[in-house]
Amino acid sequence: MNHLVKPVQTRRDVLIGLGAVGVGLVAGPALAGDRPMISTGRNTVCNNAGVLVSDLSGRIATTADFTGAADCALSRDTVEGPYFICTDTMNARNIAEGLDGTPMTLAIRVTGRGCTPIPGAIVDVWQCDARGNYSGHAVSPDDPPRVGRGRPREPDASTRFLRGVLATDAEGIVEFDAIYPGYYHRRAIHTHYKVHVGDTAYLTSQALYPEEWNDRIVANPMYGEGRSVKRALNADDYIARSAGLFAVSERGGRLLATINLSVPA
């Protein structure tokens, strides 16, 4: 491959960048638009009324992008982590919201028993920005606060970038327009996801990215310049043994990251 998709170089609202330099964002409770939580704990369950269906007509991934010998093996849970939010249902496909970073579409297929696609499965995704910041949380990505194992952190910022929720289309696929995520203290580059079918949260996990792509992306100063922490490699990440792995390619002038998630539904 002879070229790399060029990162977007835009300017957002100044609040978005404050976390990268250690300045707190405006604190506050969960936004009125966030979905209610039905239950909390190691695996949060959200009220998914009103979640939109991913637009099949605008999809760039094909079903062929999800074929492979292990693509229907049952996906494994990992930790939810402290930063999950039952985000607003209207924060749908475009979750990048003009953030600086390498443009990337996340394409996720959900299958059930017998490798059958599940239409209408609810998929949440959440990830950090190019500098390691999570929306909704005013913490430093280079030295995050200690949070008890299995305990979520209460949102204390009003931002909701790089968070989205959609229902799978007729072929069991959702797509989100995002950016390639950055890294933060002790963690390899990754994106989180949660899958509900009906009122049950069947899967809460995350997936890493191939190291050859990580190397190319973080070579851009936008991702690492001036950081006080080094990127953890996939092999050194304490969650890597249970996490999935995205397949990454270039398509339509942006990166495409695909993964198949299989749940016992």
Image (tube, helix red, strand yellow):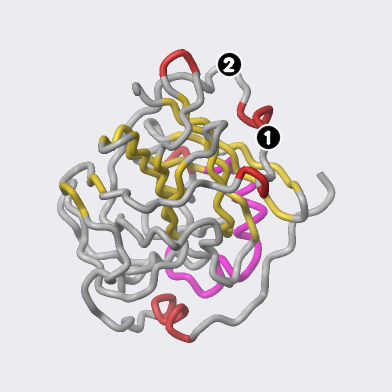
| Label 2 element class | loop
Identify the amino acid type marked 1. Thr
Name the residue: 31% across, 74% down: 138
Q: Alpha-carbon neighbours of circle 2 within 10 Å: few (<14), some, or many (≥20)?
A: few
Identify the amino acid type marked 2. Ala
Pinpoint residue 137: horizontal percent, then vertical percent. Answer: 31, 69
User: Relative to 45, is 208 on the left or the right?
Assistant: right
Nearest to the observer: residue 229 or residue 78: 78
Q: Which residues fall within the magenta stretch?
A: 209-230
Name the residue: 40% across, 48% down: 124
Pinpoint residue 246: horizontal percent, then vertical percent. Answer: 55, 38
Q: Which residue is mark 2?
A: 69
Q: Which residue is mark 1?
A: 62
Pinpoint residue 52: horizontal percent, then vertical percent. Answer: 46, 51
CA distance separating discs 1 and 2: 17 Å
| Label 1 element class | loop
